[in-house]
Image (spheres, rainbow, N blue to C red):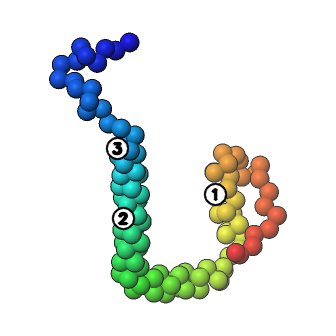
Amino acid sequence: MLNFASIQGFDPSTVQNGSNTLYVTLMGIGIVFFGLVCIVVLCTLMSAIFKAFSKGEKQEVKQSANVVTEANAKIENKQEFVAAVSAAIAEEMGADVSAIRIKSIKKI
């Protein structure tokens, strides 16, 4: 057992009571909660700023997406397209092209 009288500079009359301990605990919890609220506010603020700056970029992406879908709408040689898809799937699976069978290809 620890003998407090043997510690130099220890005064038993300065031992904190329960209310002081409760105060320190509540202050710690309060500070952590305040910090978390600050983080949420900063994230919301940064999100709003990025959305404001990216409005022009979204319009550019939509325009380029329309060009891509128009280009993909017309497949001139379907056999070459099926062969390319078959080769890509076979390469990903690590199998031979003759080992896979594609029953249908649908545009999503």
Q: Secondary structure at mark 3?
A: helix
Amino acid type of the residue tagged 3 in the rendering: Asn
Looking at the image, residue 84 lies above or below residue 25: below
Residue 55 x %, y %: 41, 84
Q: Are there few (<14), some (14-19), or many (20+) residues within 10 Å of tag 1?
A: few
Q: CA distance from mark 1 to mark 3?
A: 69 Å
Disc on res. 88 = 1
Residue 45 x %, y %: 37, 74
Q: Which residue is mark 2?
A: 38
Q: Which residue is mark 3?
A: 20
Q: Between residues 107 and 82, which one lies in front from this camera angle?
A: 107
Q: Secondary structure at mark 1?
A: helix
Describe residue 69's horizontal placement relative to residue 9 as left or right: right
Q: Between residues 35 and 60, which one lies in front from this camera angle?
A: 35
Going from N to C along the chain, the mark reached first, 1 or 2, is 2
Looking at the image, residue 27 lies above or below residue 13: below
Going from N to C along the chain, the mark reached first, 1 or 3, is 3
The quarter of the picture where residue 43 lies is bottom left
Q: Between residues 36 and 73, which one lies in front from this camera angle?
A: 36
Describe residue 71's horizontal placement relative to residue 9 as left or right: right
